[in-house]
Amino acid sequence: MDESSMTSAPTAAPGPPTPPVPLSELLATKDLGLRRIAGPAETELLWVHTSEMADPYPYLLGGELLLSAGVLLTDADHYVGRLVEAGAAALGFGVRPVHETVPGALIEACDRQGLPLLEVPPETPFTAIARTVWRLMAEARHRELRRVTRAQQALATAAARPDPVPAVLHQLAAQLGGRAVLLTARGEEIHAAGRRLPPEAAGALTRLARVVARERPGSPASATDTHGDTHVSAYALGGGEGLVLALATRQRESGDHTVAGIAVVLLSLLAAPHQGADAAGRSAALVRMLLGADPAEVAPLLGATGPWTVVHARRTDGTPADALTAGALGASLGTALVDASRGGGEAVRLLLPGAEAEGKAGDDETAKTQAVEARPGSEPARPGSEPARPPKPVSITPQPGWTLGASAPTPVTALDAADALAARALAHARATRAPLTVNAPVSGLAALVPPEDAAAHARALLAPLTAPLADTLRCWLSLHGSWDRTAVALGVHRNTVRQRIGRCGELLDADLDDMDVRAELWFALRQG
């Protein structure tokens, strides 16, 4: 088909799979001898096209550097106007043999209509210009791939941190040089990183986030906009939670969308609810508990029928843990049963179905990090019989950035006692600066004493002590009489510990420096 017979408007075409080339980079290539003689200095080139048509409009996609010698140029204003309508990025005009110089009317038209005009010297072939543009595009593509690879590695490293969601947002903001915000479907900020935005730009970002929030069918997966000199974009996260990643940057660079896409995938995985237990089962268990069902009845709905382990956790750096960070900890430990909503600086609590640990409970490495506490609900041992082997603990491993305290595997009917023991284990871990402390179940000689006799002896021996004094004495003995570590574990001053232990000695009429006395008191305290 003859080109001149086509008069229909061009259809929109996607850009090439390579980054655009700034016009300034092409002009900086000295061996081409190009010179800008009209129009703005800044534009981006997506293609190179050569045409001597009087009206090349129907054959342009937009973003081209159009090269022409002006063979059919008669009306400069009309010619430039059609190029601007087609979205051409710039015009390169070759002098000789058709024109000795660039026509003045063409220079004036390009200046007036804002189209960059380049003078191409006679010794520079159009093919050399095209080859240079493709080379610059390939170099830009290589730079983009290297940048995206570095960003991917940095984001993946951030996702492995103890606080993965804030870490990913911080790294994303650093990579893009802007603001990264995680929002709810209602526009409420959960986490943010990067420079703060002016109120107007922040409002535009929130409004754009509501566009992609998946609260209604047909919502787009992403959206972009410009507010003043700020580019804003929003991406819906997967997982059905309605969360949105919103970004604001001063400029858009090649590869930004790819980097943002990597962050969207990571944040979708981190923010999605853990799938270890069925959500419907958890909902049914909650309803039945609220309606008065026995814990043993609802436990199978939570994915386990055997013993459970209670874990208390605090951030090592002392910062409070939000719901998403606590959820990431739960995912690392293999549970969706996480309580991070108590506030007031309280520890995160997790409930783990009783899985077996890889190592033995009594090996040397485990013994170094185990607190000496009683396992609630343990089976009584009969006099003269071989003590029952304690069940293996769950597969709890130290987590970077966290201090953990865990109960021993416990029947569902004794979780309240296990909760208290996990709190003690956490206090012990913080006092000894251990990443993990696990309760040691009753074993050895203590397991040979009938539990009812042991409990009666403990009640009689410890009767003079109040509950706070008994707790202080238990903690002090577990930490081998260390005043400072006991103070850290209990959150009190070391002088308070000294006073309480002194009071215990007075009420019990016992020498607490005597090892036999300590051993008997420890045996009694483990029964409570």
Image (cartoon, rainbow, N blue to C red):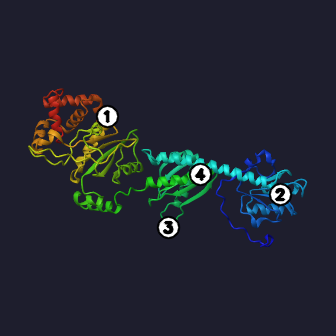
Q: CA distance from mark 3 to mark 2?
A: 49 Å
Give coordinates of residue 53: x percent, y percent: 82, 65
Q: Are marks 3 and 2 in contact (CB under 8 Å)?
A: no
At label 2, the amino acid type is Ala
Q: Are marks 4 and 2 in contact (CB under 8 Å)?
A: no
Does 93 sit left or right of 293 as displayed? Answer: right
Q: Residues within 10 Å of mark 2 (few under 14, many from 20)?
A: many
Q: Which residue is mark 1?
A: 432
When the figure is inspected, residue 227 is found, relative to residue 79, above or below; the finding is: above
Query: Is residue 68 depicted above or below 6 in this figure?
Result: above
Residue 196 in view (yes/no): no
Q: Position of residue 261 (x, y in %)?
A: 54, 55
Amino acid found under the numbered disc labelled 4: Asp
Q: Nearer the viewer, mark 4 or mark 3?
A: 4
Residue marked by disc 4? 256
Q: Where is residue 513? Give x, y as percent.
A: 18, 26
Kindly check if marks 1 and 2 are in contact, taking CB atoms under 8 A apart as contact.
Answer: no
In space, the residues marked 4 and 2 are separated at their CA atoms by: 35 Å
For mark 2, give the secondary structure.
helix
Give the residue drawn at x 21%, y 30%. Answer: 501
Q: Amino acid at mark 1?
A: Thr
Q: Is the residue marked by circle 4 packed among few (<14), some (14-19), or many (20+) residues within 10 Å?
A: some
285 versus 331 height, above or below: below
- Amino acid residing under circle 3: Pro
Query: Residue 88: percent from the left, percent from the top?
Result: 75, 59
Residue 8 in view here: yes
Q: CA distance from mark 4 to mark 1?
A: 46 Å
- Quadrant containing the C terminus in the rendered view: top left
Q: Which residue is mark 3?
A: 217
